[in-house]
Image (cartoon, coloured by chain):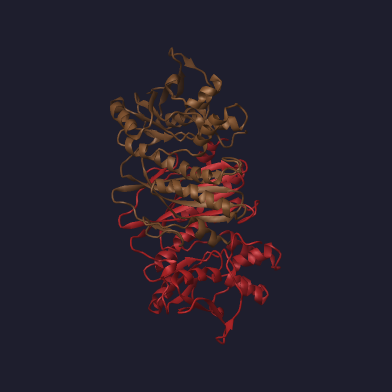
Chain colours: A brown, B red
């Protein structure tokens, strides 16, 4: 099987929303009037973001999910993506499963693969995603305002618990570990949530590197501080099986949850609660934007906790 | 240096043409009225597309150049790009040179880096490029028409000669080898040419895998044949130093030239000649689109030559 057969067999599907899809030098895409383009890119590397023997169907899902999550955090409607794929060899079973996982998620969000590249090399998946958002929409990291509530979707920490289990830091019952694996391997990008909250919120981002580190980015870019009530941060039920300090680490600093973190004026509370109801998603108020700098964690009695938490840095020594 | 410092130091520059550039979950971009988006992606892998010790400044140029070339082949005006970069380690000298080479070419074309990803991993460069083209423009591989002239820009084969030299297939004087290296390492994407010929041509593509193989794509997608007069295909002057059969292979099947290959009605000859003059680019008529299938090469006496040439396939055994 050569490069062109491979693309035809596994990665060429109808692209009715594109003017020109796969197969030419570039795809041609038409933007809806009154919209601007939202563009993001993420790269997953074997041995770094996933094990080389990871289930390819789940990997196909996750590679696209992390990109969809970036558009969700902008309140954008995803439309198209490109895939650049380096493969050590052509493995038909692997490709069939990978593309099945990827396209299942693409279909669920109504988006189209419109181009990309395949080459021989260490297993690496680079996806670039493009979507549309109404011109003037600004759900940016820099827009948090003093007094804003800080919200998160979903319970946090199950993906981190899966990593702790796989790396031998914790022991979990098989059934609990399997549930955590699902959260790590098959994150559900909060696209509908991002669309729904867009008119109401100030700042937003997705939680990929952990709440503590990601919230720090909002504080830096909005030139503000944040005060988080630790007990208000929703923990995944699976964390009950962890020692207390690891459960805290998982929910506050664990990456890979791909929930949304956002700030909104207190006046938006009723509408945001209704959106959570409508979408069947838990939305939790976990603190406030403050005049200070950095993220302050407080306990049940209002005492400041020194947790020493940071986000994930790809170039930090392991 | 962590991931965020690295991005700030080497890859964050002003992006006046973007609504939101680097630093948020996604970039926000506004398209000009009456235009559609052209999107392409290319991935370069160390050990496959370049040697791991390749000059990083030239590598930064080339990684962007191959993407610009795809937009040139669509007649699009490049606007923005994203960069996903896997690095084995943080090497400040390498990053400074790589970003210098990349941004020098970006500046020459007035385009902006608006996002991407950096991670630890085997050296891999994945760029996605986006540009604008007038709505309705269709300079596609599928648009060749019976009787069209087939044109190429520039002399061909110098990049292939550099590869032949580096892999020990030919011996070249140092000065000749250095000139070939420049063509291989610093291809000049024909963006201005693509813009200028857009109203005149039918099919177009860039020559990345070799004239013979790339022309076959046009024939397949346009359901036509092509007849190429071998002597009319312009050879780089450096090929004079090669044995005749290798010179022929270099100009007809050598990849990495990134010149444009296009078809146009005979009525466009005077205008295309004038465009070549204006841009200071050699444009050559090398054959015709025929009613057959596949690419036929003919010699000076009109005899069919059996050259057994194919394009490059990344998954073919080396």
Q: Is residue A286 above or below residue B295?
A: above
Report whether residue B102 is seen.
no
Front in this rendered view, residue A27 or B176: A27
Residue B243 spot, x, y in % from top left: 68, 75
Outermost residue on the front side: it is A175
**Quarter holding residue B39:** bottom left
Count all numbered tags in the image, as a single digit. Answer: 0
Residue B35 spot, x, y in % from top left: 33, 57
Q: Say which residue appears at 51% left-offset and 71% top-offset.
A: B215
Residue A131 spot, x, y in % from top left: 38, 47
Q: Is residue A283 above or below residue A82?
A: above
In the rendered view, does A74 fall on the left or right side of B100? left
Report whether residue A72 is seen.
yes
Front in this rendered view, residue B286 or A269: A269
Q: Quadrant of the C terminus of chain B?
A: bottom right
Q: Say which residue appears at 42% left-offset and 21% top-offset.
A: A232
Q: Quadrant of the N terminus of chain B?
A: top right
Front in this rendered view, residue A258 or B75: A258
In the rendered view, does B271 fall on the left or right side of A127? left
């Amino acid at each position: 099987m050569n490069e062109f057969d491979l693309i035809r067999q596994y990665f060429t599907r109808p692209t009715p929303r594109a003017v020109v899809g796969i197969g030419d030098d570039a795809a041609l895409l038409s933007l809806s009037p009154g919209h601007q383009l939202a563009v993001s890119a993420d790269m997953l590397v074997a041995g770094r973001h996933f094990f080389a023997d990871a289930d390819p169907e789940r990997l196909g899902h996750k590679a696209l999910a992390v990109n969809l999550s970036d558009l969700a955090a902008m309140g954008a409607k995803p439309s198209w993506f490109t895939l650049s794929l380096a493969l050590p060899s052509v493995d038909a079973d692997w490709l069939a499963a990978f593309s099945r996982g990827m396209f299942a998620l693409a279909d669920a969000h109504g988006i189209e693969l419109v181009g990309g590249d395949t080459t021989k090399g260490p297993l690496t998946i680079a996806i670039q995603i493009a979507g549309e958002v109404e011109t003037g929409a600004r759900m940016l990291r820099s827009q948090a305002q003093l007094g804003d509530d800080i919200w998160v979707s979903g319970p946090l920490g199950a993906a981190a618990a899966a990593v702790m289990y796989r790396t031998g830091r914790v022991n979990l019952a098989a059934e609990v570990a399997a549930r955590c694996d699902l959260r790590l391997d098959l994150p559900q990008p909060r696209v509908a949530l991002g669309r729904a909250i867009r008119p109401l919120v100030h700042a937003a981002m997705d939680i990929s590197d952990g709440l503590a580190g990601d919230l720090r980015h909002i504080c830096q870019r909005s030139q503000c501080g944040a005060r988080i009530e630790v007990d208000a941060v929703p923990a995944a039920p699976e964390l009950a099986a962890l020692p207390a300090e690891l459960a805290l680490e998982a929910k506050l600093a664990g990456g890979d949850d791909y929930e949304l973190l956002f700030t909104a004026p207190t006046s938006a509370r009723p509408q945001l609660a209704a959106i959570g109801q409508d979408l069947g998603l838990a939305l939790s108020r976990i603190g406030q934007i403050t005049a200070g700098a950095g993220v302050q964690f407080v306990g049940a009695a209002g005492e400041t906790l020194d947790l020493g938490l940071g986000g994930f840095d790809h170039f930090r020594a392991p």
